């Protein structure tokens, strides 16, 4: 178990304290960090929102969130009591200076009580429209501090296009140092996502074949059975490109394609990632229809249950042209990846919930075996299972037992359960938010998006966003819930002689 000496006294101010993200993710993650001894003895959580609540009511709401969503299950009474004493609630209008004067008073109170200068973490779990006003008010109230004393955490989406992301970066940059700004992409906190770096750069085995000479193509697929749930309001302004591709899928792409970093230092890792984004080939407006497919789900069936279409979801316009599915074919113009297609795909209300990266290697240069031996032959594939399965699988050919030579594809597998067998028992897999919150309190920004990364990611997507916004799809909904998405996405990859692996 870790010692709490690793983080300094911290006050978390959670904007959007009564919201879904705090309920499901932030407070359950902080509670687990507390249970595992990662939080210092001196910490405070101030939730803020517009609803009038007593501290006790607020704590009870959070307790329900923990009981329902924490990976460790229901909170134990005594531990919860101890933790909840660190939580208070402040009703506030975050547009008014008065709210920030109250924060300052509360911070001062903790400072007096602890006789130590705390680190303040402003967590903006609010809709993006409020980011600027909160940042400006923090500045006006002289609460912006320095990296040693203050951090601001911004949830995605960071901007809704290149221009708005730049504007937000400029505003934040005028108030905070870049090292104080933590742009969250929760995929980067996932164990299996962090493991991509470990797999690639702590092993000598694959690096010399990790390039255009041996790799035929790469697939990055993030499928969800879930629909937009209660987030119709948000989703209507976002859609699959902004919600998933610009951040989560591009980060996975960067980790697969980046050059080896010299050190595991935040800026070094992020420099190598931004190199990938900068090398992504610019998509010309007239190419969009050949390299990008959009989709929206209609009603259907998922695992025997009826699922409504996107148009019938709560807070969604009956004729909405918003996309719930996107598939792209991208190229990285550099020495390592020239000519290797990267196929990306994500969608809601698909048949499976599965996030998988497939690296498909090139065929053998010459087939030595007779045709009858190779009827089941398949190229080598390395499959990185992000979730819900967590592991890595290597597919290769083996001789099928028998008197004749016949090849058959087989797999070698690593699963996270294997750590136990390898004599390295773990304390369970932390939720992405646990890892990220701990990194924020330690001031480590390796797993967060830097300003230039966010802008480079938008830059790549802008031609597609503009083309699609200029011509809304006339055929939506174009896939049934519970299927693999629109047939055009299969055609996108089939044109090159491939098919989606999952
Ligand atoms: C969020 C998106 O960032 O990621 C959601 O806003 C999506 O739409 C979610 O469902 C997926 O995250 P995870 O961790 O469940 O794969």
Image: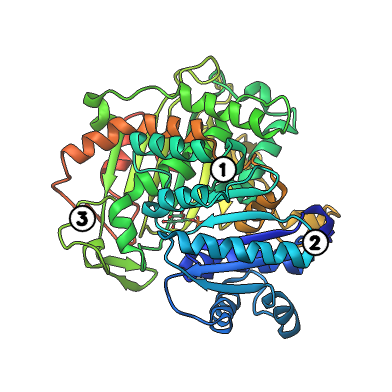
Q: Tell me where residue 300 appears, x and y as whole percent.
A: 27, 65
Q: Give the mark, 2 or 1, whose residue is nearer the N terminus.
A: 2
What separation in Å lies between label 3 and label 1 (alpha carbons)?
39 Å
- Label 2 neighbourhood size at 10 Å, few (<14), some (14-19), many (20+)? few
**Label 3 near ligand 1 (CB < 8 Å):** no
Res. 82 visible in picture: yes
Query: Mark 2 sits on what residue?
Result: 115
**Label 1 near ligand 1 (CB < 8 Å):** no
What separation in Å lies between label 2 and label 1 (alpha carbons)?
26 Å
Q: Tell me where residue 182 appears, x and y as whole percent.
A: 57, 45
Q: Give the mark, 3 or 1, whose residue is nearer the N terminus.
A: 1
Q: Nearer the viewer, residue 394 or 73?
A: 73
Give the colour scheme shown.
Answer: rainbow
Residue at the image position 38 percent from the left and 43 percent from the top: 159
Q: Nearer the viewer, residue 304 or 20?
A: 20
Query: Mark 1 sits on what residue?
Result: 181
Query: Mark 3 sits on what residue?
Result: 477
Q: Nearer the viewer, residue 28 or 181?
A: 181
What separation in Å lies between label 3 and label 2 (alpha carbons)?
60 Å
Res. 375 visible in picture: no
Determine whether 368 is above or below 249 in the image. Answer: above
Residue at the image position 58 percent from the left and 84 percent from the top: 56
Q: Give the mark, 3 or 2, whose residue is nearer the N terminus.
A: 2
């Amino acid at each position: 178990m870790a010692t709490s000496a690793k983080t300094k006294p911290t006050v978390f101010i959670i904007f959007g304290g009564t919201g879904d993200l705090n309920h499901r993710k932030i407070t359950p993650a902080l509670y687990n960090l507390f249970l595992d001894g990662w939080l210092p003895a001196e910490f405070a959580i101030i939730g803020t929102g517009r609803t009038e609540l007593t501290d006790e009511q607020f704590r009870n709401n959070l307790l329900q969130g923990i009981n329902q969503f924490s990976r460790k299950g229901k909170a134990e009474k005594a531990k919860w009591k101890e933790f909840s004493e660190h939580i208070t609630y402040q009703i506030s209008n975050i547009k008014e200076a008065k709210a920030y004067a109250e924060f300052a008073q509360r911070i001062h109170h903790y400072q007096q009580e602890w006789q130590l200068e705390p680190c303040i973490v402003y967590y903006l779990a609010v809709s993006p429209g409020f980011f600027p006003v909160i940042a400006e008010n923090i500045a006006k109230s002289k609460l912006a501090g320095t990296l040693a004393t203050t951090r601001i955490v911004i949830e995605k989406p960071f901007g809704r296009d290149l221009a708005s992301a730049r504007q937000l970066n400029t505003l934040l940059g005028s108030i905070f140092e870049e090292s104080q700004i933590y742009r969250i992409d929760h995929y980067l906190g996932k164990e299996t996502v962090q493991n991509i770096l470990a797999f690639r750069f702590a092993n000598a085995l694959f690096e010399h074949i990790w390039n255009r000479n041996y790799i035929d193509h790469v697939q990055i697929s993030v499928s969800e059975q879930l629909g937009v749930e209660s987030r119709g309001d948000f989703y209507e302004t976002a859609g699959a490109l902004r919600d998933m591709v610009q951040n989560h899928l591009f980060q996975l792409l960067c980790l697969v394609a980046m050059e080896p970093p010299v050190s595991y230092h935040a800026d070094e890792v992020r420099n190598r990632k931004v190199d990938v984004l900068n090398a992504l080939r610019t998509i010309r407006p007239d190419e969009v229809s050949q390299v990008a497919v959009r989709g929206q789900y209609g009603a259907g069936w998922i695992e025997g249950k009826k699922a409504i279409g996107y148009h019938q979801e709560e807070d969604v316009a009956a004729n909405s042209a918003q996309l719930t599915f996107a598939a792209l074919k991208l190229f990285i113009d550099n020495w390592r990846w020239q000519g290797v297609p990267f196929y990306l795909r994500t969608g809601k209300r698909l048949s499976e919930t599965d996030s998988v990266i497939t690296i498909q290697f090139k065929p053998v240069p010459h087939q030595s075996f007779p045709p009858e031996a190779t009827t089941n032959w398949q190229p080598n594939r390395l499959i990185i299972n992000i979730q819900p399965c967590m592991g890595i699988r290597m597919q290769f050919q083996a001789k099928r037992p028998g008197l004749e030579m016949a090849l058959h594809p087989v797999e070698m597998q690593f699963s996270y359960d294997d750590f136990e067998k390898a004599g390295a028992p773990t304390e369970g897999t932390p939720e992405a938010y646990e890892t990220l919150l701990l990194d924020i309190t330690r001031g480590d920004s390796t797993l967060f998006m830097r300003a230039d990364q966010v802008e480079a990611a938008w830059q790549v997507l802008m031609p597609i966003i503009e083309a699609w916004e200029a011509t809304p799809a006339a055929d939506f909904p174009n896939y049934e819930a519970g299927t693999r998405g629109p047939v055009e996405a299969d055609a996108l990859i089939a044109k090159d002689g491939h098919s989606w692996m999952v």
